């Protein structure tokens, strides 16, 4: 498999709030030279799976369900994919998907069930089981579900040399403060720029302030994503501001994503 093939498979492999699948190539195009690559808010990994491998990569997500799923995909690829192949599109499966089992592999399977079989990609709450109505024709989510195990298999190789963490994002950013460290930060959107909670691990305004301060003093390249807001604009003075258009909408309204790129 080539790196160019990865985005097509990855784009359908995990549904996740705030995912950057449609913007990933635009984001990667802003990356400067680096040896270490660090994502403190990994989530669906859309950008990581669309970039060329770096010699050292750190993938962090405070949500233990997220980090566990990626770790199981890396370490027990066939076990996880086989378990998903034998999992039906089922209301019963969805209803138990948010309950811990005590087994890392089973918890990873349940997490994939939850993000795929839910009505919406919302980890802050359960949104109900997604099922077809009488007016829907060929295809549908259950048809796409059958492809998920194969699509996840195509990602496992990319994780083979990565370090997968589940720590506070701020501590990760501060730890990897080096001239040859590229940090791509995609934190939960500022609450003022969205209409509802979306994540299992939300962050407050103070977290955003501390993150921006850490990125300003970071000695290497850095890129941060978000919706347009005055806090980022006023703090990241001198950073290049890139506006990108995403095809997805929020409550019927088109949204523009902004990248703030640290000058080299």
Image (cartoon, grey):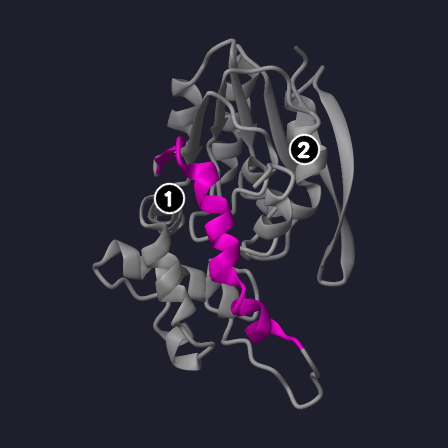
55 vs 51: above or below: above
90 vs 102: above or below: below
Q: Where is residue 16 in the image (x, y as percent from the top left)?
A: 54, 54
- Asked whether residue 10 is in view, the answer is yes
In the shown orientation, is residue 161 left or right of residue 152? left
Of the 4 image quadrants, the one containing the C terminus is top right
Residue for badge 1: 74
Residue visible at 59% across and 56% down in the picture: 12
Judging from the image, what secondary structure is the residue with disc 1 in?
A: helix
In the shown orientation, is residue 239 left or right of residue 94? right
Of the 4 image quadrants, the one containing the N terminus is top right
- Residue 232 lies in quadrant: top right
Count how many numbered circles sit on residues in the image.
2
Residue for badge 2: 27
121 vs 243: above or below: below
Q: Where is residue 126 in the image (x, y as percent from the top left)?
A: 46, 68
In the shown orientation, is residue 245 left or right of residue 1? right
Range covered by the magenta-colored residues: 139-165
175 vs 16: above or below: above
Q: Position of residue 192 (x, y in %)?
A: 63, 46
Q: Earlier in the sequence, mark 2 or mark 1?
A: 2
Q: Where is residue 88 in the image (x, y as percent from the top left)?
A: 43, 76
Q: Which of 113 and 221 is in front in this view?
A: 113
């Amino acid at each position: 498999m080539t790196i160019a093939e990865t985005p097509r498979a990855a784009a359908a492999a995990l549904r996740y709030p705030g995912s950057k699948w449609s913007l990933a190539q635009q984001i990667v195009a802003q990356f400067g030279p680096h040896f270490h690559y660090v994502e403190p808010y990994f989530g669906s990994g859309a950008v990581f799976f669309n970039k060329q491998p770096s010699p050292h990569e750190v993938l962090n997500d405070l949500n233990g369900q997220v980090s566990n799923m990626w770790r199981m995909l890396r370490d027990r690829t066939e076990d996880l994919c086989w378990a998903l192949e034998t999992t039906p599109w089922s209301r019963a499966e969805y209803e138990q998907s948010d309950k811990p089992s005590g087994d890392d592999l089973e918890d990873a399977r349940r997490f994939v069930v939850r993000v795929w079989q839910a009505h919406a990609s919302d980890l802050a709450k359960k949104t109900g089981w997604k099922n077809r109505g009488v007016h829907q024709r060929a295809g549908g989510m259950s048809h796409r579900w059958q492809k998920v195990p194969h699509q996840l298999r195509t990602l496992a190789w990319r994780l083979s040399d990565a370090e997968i963490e589940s720590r506070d994002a701020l501590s990760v950013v501060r730890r990897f403060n080096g001239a040859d460290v590229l940090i791509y930060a995609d934190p939960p959107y500022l609450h003022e720029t969205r209409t509802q909670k979306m994540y299992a691990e939300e962050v407050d305004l103070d977290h955003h302030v501390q993150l921006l301060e850490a990125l300003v003093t970071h000695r290497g390249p850095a890129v941060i994503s978000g919706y347009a807001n005055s806090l980022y604009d006023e703090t990241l003075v001198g950073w290049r501001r890139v506006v990108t258009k995403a095809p997805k909408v929020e409550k019927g309204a088109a949204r523009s994503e902004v990248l703030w790129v640290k000058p080299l």
